[in-house]
Amino acid sequence: MSAHEVRPCGGKGSGSGALYNSRLLKFCDNYAREKYSQLRLEPVYRIAGIRKYEIDDPGHWFTQDQCDKYYLALMELCGNPEFAREAGRHVIRSKEMWAVRQLILGMMSPAVFFNTIERNYSKVSRGVQATARLTSKESAEMICRPAPGTATQSYQCDVCVGILEAVGLLLTNAFAHVVHTECVHQGGDVCRFEVSWKAAPSVVWRRMRNRVFALGLPIALCLALALRPPTSLLVGAGLVLLLAGLSFVAHHKRENELLTIIQAQGSYAGDLFEDDNIRNRHALLIKSISQEAALADTRDGVAKGVITVMSKHLDYDRNGFFFYDDELLRLASQEGFTPSQVDHLRGPGEQGWKTEALLRVLENKENLVINGVKGFSEASLFGPDFPDSQLLESLLAVPVSMEGRISGLLIAANLPGKRALTQGDLSLLIGVAAQVGLSIDNVAKRRELAEGERRYRKQVQKGLEDERRRIAFDLHDHVAQDLGSLMITARMMQEKAAQKEAVPAKDLHAFVAVLKGSIDSVRDIAYDLQPPSLAQFGLVHTIQVYATDYSEKFGVAVDFRAAGVQEPLIEYDTKINFFRIVQESLTNIYKHASADTVALRLVYSYPNLILRIRDNGRGFVPHAVESGAVSGRQMGLRNMEERVRLMMGTFRIDSSPEKGCEIVVEVPLDRDVEKGSGDECSKNHP
């Protein structure tokens, strides 16, 4: 079979899937330009459906079909059936394959290289699975198996042969000998290559030295016994000199080999250094964008900061960021567009564009990459009415998304005369888009948090005012009226005493009754504000007393039970919060639920203190209460939820109309913290 003939080795999808790194075409491209300088390779690119910038981009990958058309068209243009093999030999000298060269040079010998080929082969090819094993000190066997669904071609075997030959050249100054013993294109199951190479000069001289030593030592011993001392000494000295000479030559050869490797490594260090610089610049760019976005408190501030940083650090002619809300695009920030273009983007254009290119990005969530397409302009992206439009050299459009929803569009473009945008630019822009999406989401969450905090503060303030009004009502309608009645009774008693009249016993009894009622009212108000038994007797006792009083006062049966509760484990703040939750719940039940029984359970189950409050009232829809206007019930529920949140616990409501309501509170307790709050509160609340 000739090298120009193409025959699939089976399987579908030869033209689909990115399988081969652009470096495998780049070294071939360079070899063709070097050896056949009169050739024009643009027709080859057109036949293969690829572009020069894609070959130059080390991050780009090509399909099997693209590689087939490229190699076959190039071999036909050169008129050399051995072109693929020769190009494979050129890989070692190719600048674009410095990573491969560095890898081989780092191995220090072909044997070590073949031991690691399976792990490193996938860096340049996904279409073939390669394995290798050593068969001797200077020989190895390599097996290439096409990946499932991949139809490799015969020219790829020739390229592989050339590369294997060049591996020997790099370290031994001579091409390795490669025999292709089995091939999938000739009916084999795999492609099998037997590789052998000459030992390096330093290895040859070391072996000579070792053999001389192994043979010469017993000979020298025998001669030393057979000959007289002067002669035996001369023989021994000659043997030592011979071994020293062989060792010197072997060491000198090894030094030269290492020097050659070091010099070769040094010539590639510049490329690696520049590559690292690019990655560092990109990392600093992402960091700068993150810092700018962190300082912004609005979405537009994020967009402006991103475009400012991109314009400062990148050399794109156009930078633009658009928000995508309700299927409408809105220009948020830009750099490089003309004033008339900006007016168009911020004017009627905000009604949305439905060009094919934008639909691909915004609806299909694709990354748009356009380079050197004749006739493509900014009007092709933004519609035919886009003013001052001109052809573009290249354009990238990347959707900005968060949690699967597109929130914006990031655009970078270069005008003719500038470089084409590569896969590296696309990867950078994707990273920027991800950071922008995260920053926009953070701004929205900060705003929601601030709004929630504002609403909560407003509700807390309202709750405080309601509490003040309740206390004022209790003082006015109970304590103040009772004291007023006492004052009138006291004056009457004073007048009778002045007239030396006896005070009737019933008046004294009424006086004492009113005084007792005033004292009870003051105690009730004080108990609601701060139950003194909480610090003295604990949470369980306080809830039990409150539940009993509640049942007697409102006629609602409260069944309170506690299990496993260890008072020393509970901080005083936790106790007061749990008591307030019980108090708020029972108040809501009396005001809104029309219930006649309440089940109240307080249980400790390591590591949580669990409170369950269940009533048989009319129930409600929790979501409707949360989304409705602020009411007494809503305020009470939010107060309870906020108390639980402050205790780092969970708050759950289970209710439905006519089926009652259950509130569940779970709060973790810390066993390792010394619980001294109760003692302190005992001192402060006798």
Image: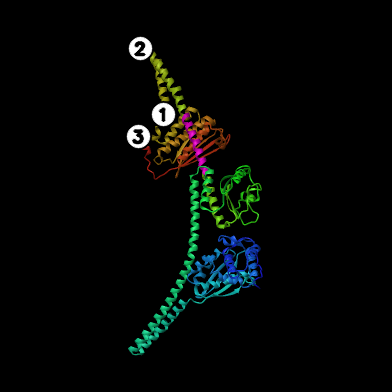
Instruction: Look at the image and tell me in which quarter the N terminus lies.
Output: bottom right
- Whole-percent x and y of residue 474? 45, 25
Crowding at dot 3, Cα within 10 Å, few <14 / some 14-19 / many 20+, comes out as few
Q: Is residue 73 above or below residue 409?
A: below
Mark 2–mark 3 Cα distance, whole angstroms, equals 44 Å
Label 1 SS:
helix
The residue closer to the viewer here, 427 or 117, is 427
Neighbour tally class for label 1: few under 14, some 14-19, many 20 plus, Cα within 10 Å: few
**Of the residues shown, which amino acid type is indicated by label 1?**
Ala
Please, what secondary structure does the residue beneath circle 3 have? Answer: helix
| Residue type beneath disc 2 | Ala
| Residue 430 higher or lower than 561, as above or below | below
Residue name at image x 37 percent, y 88 percent: 223
Quick one: quadrant of the C terminus? Answer: top left
Let me know if residue 609 is in the magenta part: no
Foreground residue among 499 and 412: 412
Residue 469 image offset from top left, x and y in percent: 47, 26
Please tell me which residue lies in front, 23 or 20.
23
| Residue 683: mark in rendering | 3
Dot 2: element: helix
Q: Which residue is mark 2?
A: 497
Q: Are marks 1 and 3 in contact (CB under 8 Å)?
A: no
- The span shown in magenta is 443-466
Regarding residue 514, the answer to whether it shows in the image is yes
Image disc number at residue 193: none
